[in-house]
Image (tube, rainbow, N blue to C red):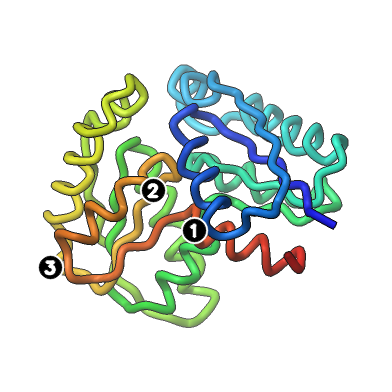
Amino acid sequence: MSKRIVLIHAVRTAIPPILHAFQEGWPEAKLSNLLDDDLIPAYNREGGVTPHIVERILGLALYASRTGADGILFTCSVFPQAEDMAKQVVRVPLLKPDEAMIAAALDAGKRIGVVATNPPAGPAAEAQLRSGAAARGQEIQVIQSLAEGAFAIGNAGDAATHDRMVVEAAERIAGAVDVLCLAQVSMALARPKVQAKVSVPVLTAPATAVARMKSLLGG
């Protein structure tokens, strides 16, 4: 019997990459989408992850669970603490967008590059990398590179310029790291262009998240 996965999004541009990753990695899964495209504006208005935003994240997870989901996958990397809290209030597997990618990056080397287009996403990824490394007793170096302005450009529909800016941000740090992480689901479709320009492995959240969810649910 096919498993039903509810995908929870904060930006529309995260939807095509995660659907693409499921089509490649687990096409049998049945997918449903929840979108709250005011979450990022609210983060900016309220100055961070406030109790109000946490409440919204928890509400989305609970709603997804009540619809009969077998698994829940968030696709926004800005709210990892709230998503960790959401894991505690639902009875089905719930994944943060990049937790599987974080584990893969820690397996790949000590010098980890993080490329982001949305300014809060880079620090959020670094915090998760450092937390994961500490749990393993592993020492790491994290280097961030921001494709400044690319987030808004991608949301406006200019994928070509978005991807070019992501490639440029990746190239700035590729020589100093063992592995590169594209910190947001919305960046994943740029991976082939990035990988063509750098010699280190390039990881994306969607591919690793789909593989992890499939493993958890026995797909």
Q: Which residue is drawn at 64% across and 45% down?
A: 83
Mark 1, residues whose alpha carbon is within 10 Å: few (<14), some, or many (≥20)? many
* Cβ atoms under marks 1 and 3 closer than 8 Å: no
- In the drawing, does residue 82 fall left or right of residue 172? right
Q: Nearer the viewer, mark 2 or mark 3?
A: 2
Q: What element carries label 3?
A: loop
Q: For mark 2, what is the residue?
A: 188
Q: For mark 3, what is the residue?
A: 175
Q: Residue 62 carries which label?
A: none
Q: Is mark 2 on a helix, strand or loop?
A: helix
Q: Position of residue 70 (x, y in %)?
A: 81, 51
| Residue type at numbered disc 3 | Gly
| Residue type at numbered disc 1 | Ala
Q: Residue at x 56, y 60 (%)?
A: 25
Q: Which residue is drawn at 48% across and 31% down?
A: 48
**As displayed, is residue 93 above or below residue 73?**
below
Q: For mark 1, what is the residue?
A: 207
Nearer to the camera, 52 or 154: 154
